[in-house]
Image: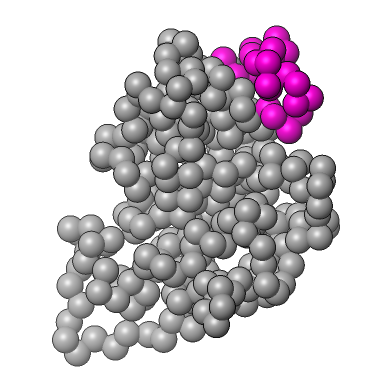
């Protein structure tokens, strides 16, 4: 169980995340939604401890993640693997070596510096690449791949960390529709096949509703919706996204009548 209690992150006077609290059961696929600048990325980065909370706690299986330091913190970052919007691959290195970077927390530093990876780690990395039909490109430079291929390599790298949680920060933001589906299918397969919890920042409500079993909506750093996708009505979504609503809800979204009553977001989860 991942538990977030009163998590806050301030940059000067501005709170990027403001008093966020929720718990996530193992094996969930949770979508974090909201407008650009709502605090989604900062929330995921705090869970991974790439950003330091100003207040609050993160607990995982009873361990206070916010108190971890040194080796324990490195191990937590391996257990909560990050997938980034811009892939974060080393372009000059081959695909296999990029995936093997996910094993850095488990091997002595001299092995990574000399690139003398244990054979069992190489086998694990190749197995991960096979999961996403990328094994044939193992020897190719990462910067020669398409965006969708690079993101699949990044997901394979996360998988070899043998994580309990995968934190995907807008993983399909720069991809075309075909590669978007391929990457989202890959995350869903990891979630269902391996039982790994996935927390994924998404801008598209159509995708969030299609892939996630729970949605957490953020606005101005605060959690304003938490529930099943079916309970996120178009009226609530339009208030959540405001001027961006038409862009993120897809062409099939029903128009809102002029006299419609939009519910308060603070009561959306209870509605």
Q: Which of 10 and 64 is in front in this view?
A: 10
Residue pictured at 19% horizontal, 59% vertical: 252
Depth check: give the residue in front, 54 or 231. Answer: 54
The N terminus sits in image quarter: bottom right
Magenta residues, start to end: 103-126
Q: In the rendering, at what x and y percent does residue 39 appear?
A: 49, 67
- Please tell me which residue is depicted at 56% across the width and 73% down the height of the picture: 11
Report whether 117 appears left or right of 208.
right
Residue 157's quadrant in the figure?
Answer: top right
142 or 31: nearer the eye? 142
* Residue 60 rendering spot, x and y as whole percentages: 76, 55
**Residue 111 inside the magenta-drawn segment:** yes
- The picture places residue 154, in percent across and down from the top left corner, at 50, 33
Query: What number of labels is visible?
Result: 0
Can residue 270 be seen from the camera position used here? no
Q: In this view, does 32 lie above or below 129?
A: below
Identify the residue shown where x is 75% and y is 26%.
Answer: 109
Percent of width and height locating residue 8: 63, 73
- The question of residue 89 being in magenta is answered with no
């Amino acid at each position: 169980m991942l538990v977030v209690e009163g998590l806050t992150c301030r940059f000067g006077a501005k709170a990027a995340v403001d008093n966020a609290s929720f718990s996530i059961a193992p094996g969930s696929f949770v979508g974090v939604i909201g407008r650009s600048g709502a605090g989604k990325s900062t929330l995921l980065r705090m869970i991974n401890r790439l950003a330091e909370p100003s207040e609050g706690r993160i607990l995982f299986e009873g361990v206070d993640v916010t108190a971890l330091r040194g080796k324990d913190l490195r191990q937590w970052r391996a257990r909560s693997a990050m997938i980034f919007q811009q892939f974060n691959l080393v372009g000059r290195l081959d695909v296999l070596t990029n995936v093997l970077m996910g094993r850095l927390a488990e091997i002595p530093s001299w092995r990574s510096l000399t690139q003398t990876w244990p054979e069992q780690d190489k086998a694990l990395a190749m197995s991960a690449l096979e999961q996403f039909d990328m094994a044939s490109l193992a020897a190719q430079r990462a910067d020669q791949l398409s965006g969708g291929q690079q993101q699949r390599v990044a997901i394979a790298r996360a998988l070899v960390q043998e994580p309990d949680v995968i934190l995907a920060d807008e993983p399909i933001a720069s991809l075309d529709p075909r590669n978007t589906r391929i990457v989202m299918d890959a995350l869903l397969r990891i979630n269902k096949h391996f039982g790994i919890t996935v927390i994924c920042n998404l801008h598209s409500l159509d995708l969030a509703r299609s892939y996630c079993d729970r949605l957490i909506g953020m606005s101005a750093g605060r959690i304003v919706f938490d529930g099943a996708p079916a309970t996120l009505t178009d009226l609530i979504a339009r208030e959540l996204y405001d001027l961006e609503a038409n862009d993120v809800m897809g062409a099939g979204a029903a128009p809102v009548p002029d006299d419609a009553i939009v519910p308060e977001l603070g009561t959306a989860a209870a509605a």
